[in-house]
Image (cartoon, coloured by chain):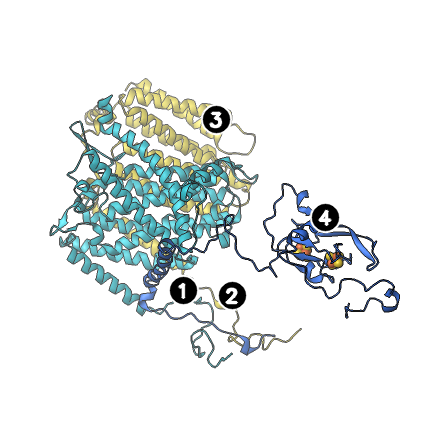
Chain colours: A blue, B yellow, C cyan
Amino acid sequence: MIRDEDILELEEPKLSAAERLYLPQILGGMQTTMVHLGKTLLANKKMTVQYPEEKRTLRLENYRGIHRLNRDEKGRVACVACFMCATACPAHCIHIEAEESPWDDREKYPAKFDLDELRCIFCGMCEEACPVDAIELTPHYDVVGRSRDEMILDKEELLSIYDKTADVKPRKNPRITGYPEVGNRSEQGPSDEGEGL
Amino acid sequence: MTPSTGYLLYLLFAMGGAGLYLLLPQPGKSRALPGVALSVLALAGLLSVLAVKVIAPSDTSAYFCLFSAIAIFGASRVITHRKPVYSALYFVLVVISVAALLVLQRAEFLAVALIIVYAGAIIVTYLFVIMLAQQSHETVYDTRAREPFFAVLVGFVLMAAITGKAVEPATTSEAKIVTAQFAQQNLAGAIEGLPEGNTADVAAALLTKYIVVLEIAGVLLLVSMVGAVALSRKKIPVEGHGLPTRPLGQIGKEVEPF
Amino acid sequence: MTEFLTSQFGVSIILAGVVFGILQGAVAYCIYFERKIAAWIQDRCGPNRVGPAGLLQPLADGGKMILKEDVIPGHVDKNLFVLAPAIMFIVAFVGFAAIPWGGQLELGGKLVSIQVASPDIGLLYILGVASMGIYGVVLGGWSSNNKYSLFGAIRATAQMLSYEIPMGLCILVIVLTVGAIRLEDIVLPQTAYWSDVIPKWNVFLHPLAFIVLFVTMLAEANRTPFDLAEAEQELVGGFHTEYSALKFGMFFLAEYASMITSSALLAVLFLGGWHLPWIPWAQPEATGIAAVIVKMLVMGGKIAGSLFVMMWLRWTLPRFRFDQLMRLAWGGLIPFTLGLFVLTVGLLYFDKHQSPLWTLGGNAVVLVLTLAVAGLSRRDVTGRPASLPSLEGRSLTHGRLAGDVS
Ligand code: SF4
Ligand code: SF4
């Protein structure tokens, strides 16, 4: 319900006679634009970045460009095929097929991991959702492809992007990377270091 | 001007009238083909009779025939076209070709005034109204002529009478002289005496000889303008808007949830 | 052959070709400069990729326009849809015929005018042609069979009809002052001097009429702040929403061509046409080929200046609201120009219409009267609609309720 106090009444300021001619304000505006024009032309103060030659500096930590799939410290794909990212993705552009993991420290791994970069809206929800920080967005943004198929990246391509960008932006230190060592599995269960998982 | 020319002219007018009658939009199947044929024949005949017999050939008579043909064609399309927007556009065509005829008569000021006033303002206003009124397809009664037969009859009898009077051999000696002079002098010759720039003369005539007429016209326009303003200033009551009548700031306060 | 070439007719034909060619180029480069100026005003660089400093951009744009697919939607009235851009384009260019570009040229002992045609009613011819331009907008908007286009067309019609009146009155002020409607005869008196120093340009006699004429020309050319016919936020693209490729290009070029016509007319009426004081080549006595070239350059410079101000304004001002636009024309400009007109007629009666002291004094009186009327009238300019309850009695400070702290 709208309360009386919530209503803010706005009244336009009364214009003086000179202001009603519009001309003084128009001249004032023209002065502003002319000053900008002069500065740009004479002092060469242009804001434009000449893109292919120059590039803007980006915030490495949070610029949201193309994705990568991280490797863990042993060089394996870090993803545990939990489907959190696919569920969180508002554009439904992640397609995962899980299989039983060949390694002991996790149950599943993605046999297939396809990401459609053309459907993606680069919102970063997948990165937020991933419990093991396996999927991440990199500051890489100039990606091109000659067909739609080319822009659907599969697991190998996503991993290769990690290989290319790992030294610029290393994988964050995930709080959990998987289950603790084999053998303790049945005793300790999944709640070891990652409390709240 | 021999009597036979006069009869030929009347015959041509009858043909033209019949052609136009066939062309006018009417219920039933389209009779456009014979209509077009008749009208074109009549128009061509009329122009050639006029060009050969009445106005002696000069360097401007070709333009005269061209623009009058366009004007007549446009005028007939104004009344025969089924879409009002096109009718208005053909009206523009008529205005422009009549302006061209005026230029041939060295009445440049009138010509341009005609274009500015009619084509530039009045017909645009027509179009404005038509565009607003005719968005969906037209109704049946909007796309057919009301009284095609009588309209054509009256129009063409009048036109034939005027034309016949203008070109027929005059009976009184005075008129005979005038007609003879008219016939002798070709179109270019008749206007040779006019000064090159005659805008000032138009103004002088308007403001001296025809000052009363001018003033009456002005007063008439003023009256219609005042009337239009008076009609359009009708106030619509505030309540009719569905706007809140309670003081501002109380809206919502008194409204209980249903 | 040489005789034909040195006759007025031959010169006119050659000039028509030359002027048409130059104008095509000028229009294309107008678009380039519009983009450049917009960029500079907004601290950007503008087109700079095609050719040095982007100078070949207009060619690239033209190529793009020609090569794009020319879509004619299925629901349009096809004849009028095709006709509309053609009307617009033709009308925008035929107006140039009556503009005196460079005074007179001596050719084989005879003087010929550097002007395609010199009708007695030159000024009225340009006005008449310009008034036909509205058909392009109206037909384009109507035939598109699209409500946004129709709205654009309707706005354009109302706007052009309204602004033609103050425009005509301003032009009448000059016609009365000079006593001629042939464009060369309007230029010639302006080449004289007051006390051998100040050129007798009409702008020094009627500065207010100059400003008003400029404003109405902006409105006639559909330029900001009067570009409601294509208000992107409300009407998609306005009357040319459905147009693509070359047809759209024709609308686009026509807009700039009519800007150039307006500017040329402004230069002729108020700024002395091709005349420039103290430069011997830009005087009416100089009739050599060099003089003609200098005169054409002077004319071009004046046109360019006016175009620059138009572009500068476009990137400065927001768009009017439609009721403000109408109120400006009918409530502001028309009474104001009527005042100027009556003033001129009065001065003409006392034979003081050529004396700057009297005209400037009269202009000042009209301006002061307007200010007084504007200051005294209690009506708001932008206005809370009268149909809403009044705010009187509610203690309002500037924009906020009194006592409203947060
Ligand atoms: S960035 Fe957003 S849209 Fe793209 S894959 Fe991740 S969750 Fe989906
Ligand atoms: S959220 Fe992370 S671990 Fe889970 S499927 Fe996606 S990338 Fe793999």
Q: Which of marks 4 and 2 is in front?
A: 4
Comparing B113 with A35, the one in front is A35
Ligand 2 within 8 angstroms of badge 4 C-beta: no
Q: Are marks 4 and 2 in contact (CB under 8 Å)?
A: no
Ligand 1 within 8 angstroms of badge 2 C-beta: no
Q: Are marks 3 and 4 on the same chain?
A: no
Determine whether, in the image, residue C171 is placed left or right of residue A189: left
| Residue picked out by circle 3 | B35
| Residue picked out by circle 4 | A156
The numbered disc on residue C382 is 1
Circle 1 SS class: loop
Quadrant into which the N terminus of chain C falls: top left
Q: In which quarter of the image is ligand 2?
A: bottom right
Eyeballing the image, is B40 above or below C204?
Answer: above
Circle 3 marks a residue in which chain? B
Q: Nearer the viewer, mark 2 or mark 3?
A: 2
> Could you say which quadrant of the image residue B192 lies in?
top left
Residue type indicated by callout 3: Gly
As measured in the structure, the alpha-carbon distance from the residue carrying label 2 to the one carrying label 1 is 23 Å
Relative image position of residue B170 (x, y in whole percent): 24, 24
Q: Nearer the viewer, mark 1 or mark 4?
A: 4
The numbered disc on residue B240 is 2
Comparing B78 with C69, the one in front is C69
